[in-house]
Image (spheres, helix red, strand yellow):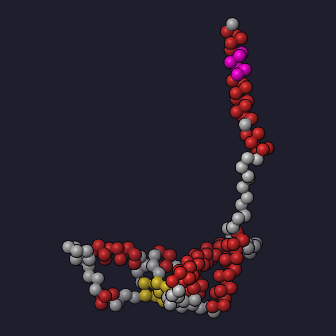
Amino acid sequence: IICGLTQFTNKNHIAFAALEAVCFQTREILDAMNKDCGIPLSQLQVDGGMTNNKILMQLQADILCIPVVKPSMPETTALGAAMAAGAAEGVGVWSLHPDDFTAVTCERFEPQINPEESEYRYTRWKKAVKKSMGWEMSEPQGNSETSIFCSLPLGFFIMSSLLMLIGAKYISG
């Protein structure tokens, strides 16, 4: 649901709201993880195609109030799978020695808004999500008015079939 649109809203506002929603959902997950284990994150390490969007990464750092660290190669999950396969027993085409990974370059996004502003925006988003739930009302099952009218087509079919059968018997003699 997109709410709060005015005549001045443009596609940039909608795109930014979509990015913001991704960040707020990430924060919601991290808050739940922190609640379960009690250990807050000091930084978020990210990978995947969406990490190529620098606006998204900065927004994520702002909303989480922690640094976001992105490796220079965004698809590290695929690289990790390839490395594990290459380091398998008998294959040995890849070394997984920790010293081999010291030259990995990363881009770091530091929070640029204060925690109060971040909390205010997150609270407003949660309030909007809560208000958007339960707005769709479905018709109750067994409504007597609709159930009677639903049976009319079948009734017409049966009556017309019966009349045609009687008419055919009458004509045939």
Whether 24 is drawn above or below 147: the answer is below
Give the farthest residue toward the left. 90
Question: What's drawn in magenta, residue-wise?
Answer: 162-167
Q: Looking at the rendering, which quadrant does residue 79 occupy?
A: bottom left
Q: As drawn, is 92 to the left or to the right of 127?
A: left
Estimate the x, y position of residue 1 in percent, counting from the top left: 67, 67
Whether 91 is drawn above or below 121: the answer is above
Please report the residue visible at 35 percent of the width from the left and 90 percent of the height from the top: 103
Residue 165 covered by magenta stretch = yes
Identify which residue, 51 or 66, lies in the foreground.
66
Q: Looking at the rendering, which quadrant does residue 8 occupy?
A: bottom right
Estimate the x, y position of residue 17 in percent, counting from the top left: 64, 75
Q: So how many labels did they put on this image?
A: 0
Whether 98 is drawn above or below 161: the answer is below
Please report the residue visible at 42 percent of the width from the left and 84 percent of the height from the top: 71
Q: As drawn, is 46 to the left or to the right of 20?
A: left
- Magenta segment's dominant SS is helix
Identify which residue, 128 or 61, lies in the foreground.
128
Estimate the x, y position of residue 153 in percent, counting from the top left: 72, 34
